[in-house]
Image (spheres, rainbow, N blue to C red):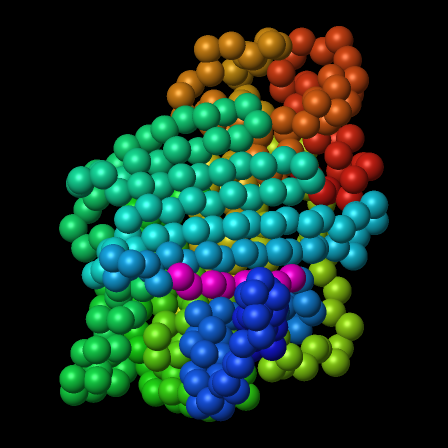
């Protein structure tokens, strides 16, 4: 980035010189000034490679903009290309652009997130208005706005990091941590997070050794994030489970051939007529302190064991209940959002909708139609885009 930044300055200088009516003498810049300019540019820009088990998945670009009012605006672009080693799978490219604005005290002001995949775009806009967060979600077939009362303890991760850093600089002992509330725009709810500054460290950034911090955060679902940040809070390395993101060129690629698959091999038989199924899943090396792989939801109950997990799958056939007729109407409010298109499902794509209609044919029983579509997907698409 230093070279690109200085090249831009050089081009602008040449344009200005060309517009002068007479030649001018330009003094050579002081080397210390160049070093200061390039260091400042890099401190506000980071390029990281995202990997899963050492296999590159994509890139993360972070830019921080200083605002005139003393606040900051962070731009983050995440580009992933994922190809599963499954029959019929094709590479999927997803890009997410996130912008977050913070006030002089680093309190959250407003933000936006746009996700694009396969020609489908979904956006989320969040703004703090008084004691509420106003959230607007837009997609191919929906545009809705919701308001959420801000709970006590709500804060931004930027403000929390700076506060903990300043407290340690003032004499607080390491490790030093706190809890705060954040908003999960995917789950549309607030959650409590625990963040801890673990230790001071050094890191190489752009050929320079810089002061840095080892940080650990556990979110409301128990997911653990480990990170190395420079003294201003810019990322150097991030680790979440089997995912890592590190400065471009700072870490070698995996030496083993890692394969990514959506298939889970199962021993035993499944009775399709059963109203309830129990599956024992053995997971080698599963850490009970880490986020569980399987969690309770509307379809399953999960018990974590020493060897792994016991899943009780609940019947979704609705034994004894009449099936709905197509087309569906008067859907419950809590059900409707799950049937709307998203970038991941792409169910708003007209070509997909037409093909689904062909699979369903003349069926009017909603349950039979759903089974037909799921069966076709499993047989033809390697369980992708389900």
Q: Which residue is found at the position 70% from the left and 31% from the top?
A: 374
**Image side of residue 328 versus residue 228, left or right:** right
Q: Is residue 69 left or right of residue 209?
A: left
Q: Is residue 154 above or below residue 15?
A: above
Location of residue 27 in the rendering, given as x and y in whole percent from the top left corner: 50, 85
Residue at image location 49% in from the left, 57% down from the top: 76
Q: Where the C terminus falls, by quadrant?
A: top right
Observer-nearest of 85 and 198 = 198
Q: Quadrant of residue 116?
A: top right
Q: How far across and down, in percent of the image, does residue 300 sit?
A: 50, 42
Residue 383 lies, with reference to residue 241, above or below; the image says: above
Q: Residue at x 79, y 48 (%)?
A: 90
Residue 191 visible to the viewer: no
Q: Which residues are magenta?
A: 58-65
Q: Quadrant of residue 59?
A: bottom right
Identify the residue at image location x=47%, y=51%.
98
Q: Above or below — where is 352 with respect to 259?
A: above
- Residue 103 seen in this snapshot: yes
- Please state the horizontal and vertical placement of residue 357, each as a whole percent of the image: 74, 17
**Quarter of the view holding residue 372:** top right
Q: Position of residue 55 (x, y in %)?
A: 69, 69
| Front in this rendered view, residue 262 or 285 | 262
Closest to the observer, 173 or 368: 173
| Residue 275 falls within the magenta-colored stretch | no
> Quick check: 175 left or right of 256?
left
Q: Residue furthest front?
A: 22
Q: Is residue 325 above or below residue 143?
A: above
Side (left or right) of 122 relative to 105: right
Q: Quadrant of the N terminus?
A: bottom right
Magenta span main SS: strand
Counting the numbered discs, the total is 0
């Amino acid at each position: 980035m230093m070279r690109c930044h200085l090249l831009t300055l050089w081009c602008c200088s040449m344009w200005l010189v060309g517009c002068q009516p007479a030649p001018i003498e330009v003094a050579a810049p002081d080397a210390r000034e160049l070093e200061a300019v390039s260091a400042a540019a890099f401190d506000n820009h980071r390029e990281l490679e995202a990997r899963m088990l050492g296999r590159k998945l994509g890139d993360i670009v972070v830019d921080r903009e200083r605002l005139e009012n003393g606040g900051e605006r962070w731009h983050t672009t995440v580009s992933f290309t994922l190809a599963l080693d499954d029959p019929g799978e094709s590479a999927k490219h997803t890009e997410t652009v996130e912008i977050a604005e913070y006030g002089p005290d680093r309190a959250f002001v407003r933000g936006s997130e746009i996700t694009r995949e396969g020609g489908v775009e979904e956006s989320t806009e969040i703004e703090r208005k008084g004691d509420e967060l106003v959230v607007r979600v837009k997609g191919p077939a929906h545009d809705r706005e919701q308001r959420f009362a801000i709970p006590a303890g709500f804060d931004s991760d930027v403000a929390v990091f700076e506060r903990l850093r300043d407290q340690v600089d003032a004499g607080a002992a390491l490790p030093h941590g706190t809890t705060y509330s954040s908003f999960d725009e995917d789950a549309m709810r607030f959650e409590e997070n625990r963040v801890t500054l673990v230790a001071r460290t050094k890191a190489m950034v752009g050929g320079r050794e810089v002061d840095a911090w080892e940080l650990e955060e556990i979110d409301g679902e128990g997911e653990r994030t480990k990170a190395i940040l420079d003294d201003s809070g810019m990322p150097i390395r991030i680790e979440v489970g089997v995912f890592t993101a590190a400065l471009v060129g700072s870490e070698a690629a995996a030496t083993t051939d890692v394969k990514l698959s959506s298939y889970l091999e199962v021993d035993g038989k499944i009775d399709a007529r059963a109203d309830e199924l129990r599956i024992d899943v053995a997971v080698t090396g599963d850490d009970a302190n880490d986020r569980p792989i399987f969690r309770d939801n509307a379809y399953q109950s999960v018990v974590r064991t020493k060897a792994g997990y016991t899943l009780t799958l609940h019947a979704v056939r609705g034994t004894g209940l009449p099936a709905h007729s197509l087309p569906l109407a008067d859907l419950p409010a809590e059900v409707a959002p799950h049937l709307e298109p998203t970038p991941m499902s792409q169910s708003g794509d007209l070509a997909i909708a037409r093909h689904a209609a062909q699979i369903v044919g003349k069926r009017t029983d909603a349950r039979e139609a759903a089974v037909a579509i799921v069966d076709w997907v499993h047989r033809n698409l390697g369980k992708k885009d389900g």
